[in-house]
Image (cartoon, grey):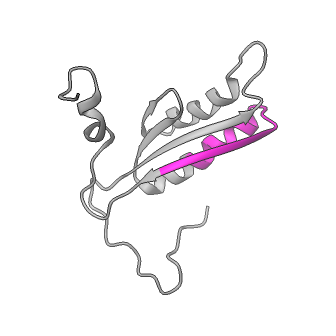
Amino acid sequence: MAAFLPLQGEPPLGPRTKEAAVIAEIQCLPAPSGDESAPYKHVEAAIDVLRRSGLRFEVGPLGTTIEGDPEAVWPALRAAHEACLRAGATRVVTIVKLFQAAGDEPTMDELTKRYRRGGDGP
């Protein structure tokens, strides 16, 4: 896979700190979503790719959130999308949301801890 290069005239991002990471949420919408014996097998193929990526991940009801180095996250997103087709879907629409900060960015846990059971949320 080709390395990402900044647009012509754009300076590259500064050096990343050891903790630098991106958070991405991916929602794969394959058609069909599976078959009679496994109604969500094409979606589950995408989740399995993310599980095997070694990235921190959390499956939610409407998508899966992953966290890690951008050089690992981007290929994992593509692999999850393509896994739906390899699993037998005839087509797939994938929606990706991405969070990245130029400096110290919060983790998935830091962004959601107040809303989890036992947190200090509302």
Q: Is residue 54 left or right of residue 101?
A: right
Seen at 44% across and 56% down, the residue is: 70
* Residue 10, x across and y down, in percent: 45, 82
* Residue 114, x across and y down, in percent: 23, 32
Q: In this view, does 113 lie to the left or right of 70?
A: left
Of the 4 image quadrants, the one containing the C terminus is top left
Could you say which is closer to the camera, residue 30 or residue 52? 30
Q: Which residue lies furthest to the bottom in this view?
A: 9
Seen at 53% across and 34% down, the residue is: 63
Q: Which residues, given as a range, are shown in magenta?
A: 77-97
Could you say which is closer to the camera, residue 3 or residue 93? 93
Q: Please tell me in which quadrant of the rendered image residue 82 appears.
A: top right
* Residue 117, x across and y down, in percent: 26, 20
Q: Residue furthest front?
A: 122
Q: Is residue 19 above or below residue 28?
A: below
Is residue 96 inside the magenta stretch? yes
